Image (cartoon, rainbow, N blue to C red):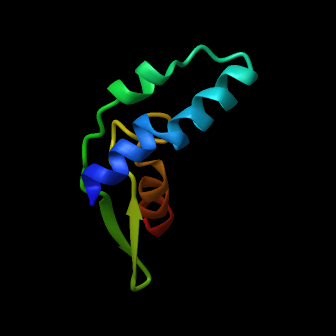
Amino acid sequence: MAVLLHAGFYKGRIADAIVAAIQERGGVMTKEDLSAHKCEHREPIMSTYRGYHIYEVAPPTAVRCQPKFLYSIHLILI
């Protein structure tokens, strides 16, 4: 299933639509760029807040926000 989804997203009609939308807006991505993309699975960061499990995208995927949300919650609790 994952292989079929990957092929359809990165090489099929969806890829054509993504590249066309990017290029229409001045972007330079090509279908070859998209098909060469490799995803790396990372486990999310998890913490708890008032009994709730809070998950955040693990770095480096969330480079701009790093784990700031979870860090902020812990600062509030201090």
Name the residue furthest bottom: 51
Q: Position of residue 28 (x, y in %)?
A: 59, 13
Near-viewer residue (59 or 4)? 4
In the picture, measured across the screen, residue 62 lies left or right of residue 17, that is left
The number of numbered discs placed on residues in the rendered structure image is 0
Q: Which residue appears at 38% of the width and 39% of the height?
A: 61
Q: Is residue 62 visible?
A: no
Q: Residue furthest front?
A: 13
Q: Is residue 74 among what the camera can see? A: yes
Does 20 sit left or right of 31 as displayed? right
| The N terminus lies in quadrant | bottom left
Q: Position of residue 54 (x, y in %)?
A: 41, 70
In what quadrant of the picture does the C terminus appear? Answer: bottom left
Front residue of 44/26: it is 26
Q: Is residue 77 above or below residue 22?
A: below
Q: Position of residue 71 (x, y in %)?
A: 42, 54
Task: Please tell me which residue is depicted at 51% across the width and 18% down the height of the picture.
Answer: 30
Is 40 or 46 nearer to us in this picture?
40
**Where residue 55 sits in the image (x, y, percent)?**
39, 65
User: Measuring 56% from the left and 33% from the top, which residue is drawn there?
Assistant: 16
Q: Could you say which quadrant of the image residue 48 lies in?
A: bottom left
Quadrant of the rendered image containing residue 46:
bottom left
Of all residues, the one furthest to the right in this rendering is 25
Residue 38 figure quarter = top left
Q: Is residue 5 left or right of residue 40?
A: right
Considering only vertical position in the picture, is 9 above or below 44?
above
- The structure residue drawn at horizontal position 34% and vertical position 46%, both measured from the top left corner, is 6
